[in-house]
Amino acid sequence: MKTTLPLLLLLLSSLALHAQEIHRIATYDNTYSTSSGILGLTDTAVYEYSWYAETWLAFPSNGLARNEEAPIINEIAACNNNSHNPSGIYVISDTAVHVYNYYASYWYSLANDGLQRVSGIVQLSDLSVRYDTEDEYVDVFVKSGNQIYQYNRYTQSWYALPNTGITKAELKTTSEIDMQIFPNPAKNNSKLEMKIPNSYRGNLTIHLYNRLGKHINTTTVLPDGSGTITIDLNLQGLSPGTYFYEIKGDDFSHVRQFVKIN
């Protein structure tokens, strides 16, 4: 029994992984021989490949944001921070960045003070981390709205890097963009209304995501110069629950949450 139990646990872990699909990966220069430093992210879990066991092993999800029972994990990034307890493994879980602690087997959230918000919802995407050898600490970067932010561990706040030099065009803040879905809660046939600056002439892409951050579809529209765009939404076939629409232009982005009902 002592021999078969570890094999059974490894088999169950492997089956759990293959029931889903890895849609994000991250690697780091690992100094431990048993684990590989190769990470995989599915819809609801973080996995690390083990050289010793020759299988993917799931991390505990304690501390992550959840929708009902399912953990919410949107992005992953990692680096070797020369310490095994705070792992150097970071994820975006809903509206906060979390770091995994091996010692506690727990994901601890970073404060989200300073990040851009739309209707009170923190905007987060494109997570990246690095180990600063001079400071001997992990630098954490995320994209929030139209800027890149760096986390300051002393003040526990995010600070925006200037957009100087990226483009000569004036960057539009998310406050200039308005988007709403009506009715909300939405039904099978609803409408999406957007208000953008009249001067904007580029294409717009509208991305639909489920509550776990999985992409569902994309729609592209060309503004007519009126400043208002209304799109008929066909939500037929979507299960009831929480969804997100993201509108992206050449120099702005905006996210709106809505609830789908039968």
Image (tube, rainbow, N blue to C red):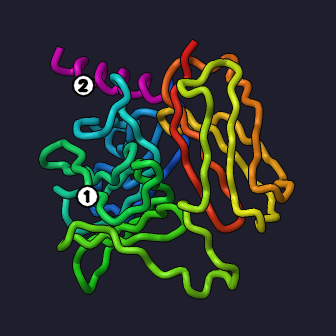
**Percent of width and height locating residue 4:** 25, 18
How packed mark 1 is, by other alpha carbons closer than 10 Å (few <14, some 14-19, many 20 or more), is: some
Between 156 and 57, which is closer to the camera in this rendering?
156
Which residue shows up at 63% across the image and 38% down it? 208
How packed mark 2 is, by other alpha carbons closer than 10 Å (few <14, some 14-19, many 20 or more), is: few
The number of numbered discs placed on residues in the rendered structure image is 2
Q: Is residue 12 left or right of residue 19?
A: left
Circles 1 and 2: CB atoms closer than 8 Å: no
Say if the magenta span includes residue 10. yes
**Percent of width and height locating residue 80:** 31, 66
| Amino acid beneath label 2 | Pro
* 210 shown above or below 158: above
* Most frequent secondary structure within the magenta stretch: helix
Residue 6 disc label: 2
Find disc 1 in the rendering and name its residue: 111
Q: Tell me the distance, in whole angstroms, between the alpha carbons under discs 1 and 2.
A: 38 Å
Which residue shows up at 35% across the image and 74% down it? 159
Which residue shows up at 51% across the image and 61% down it? 145
| Of the image marks 1 and 2, the number of the one nearer the N terminus | 2
Magenta span covers which residues? 1-17
**Percent of width and height locating residue 43:** 47, 34
**Percent of width and height locating residue 148:** 47, 70
Q: Quadrant of residue 196?
A: bottom right
Which residue shows up at 46% across the image and 45% down it? 74
Residue 219 disc label: none
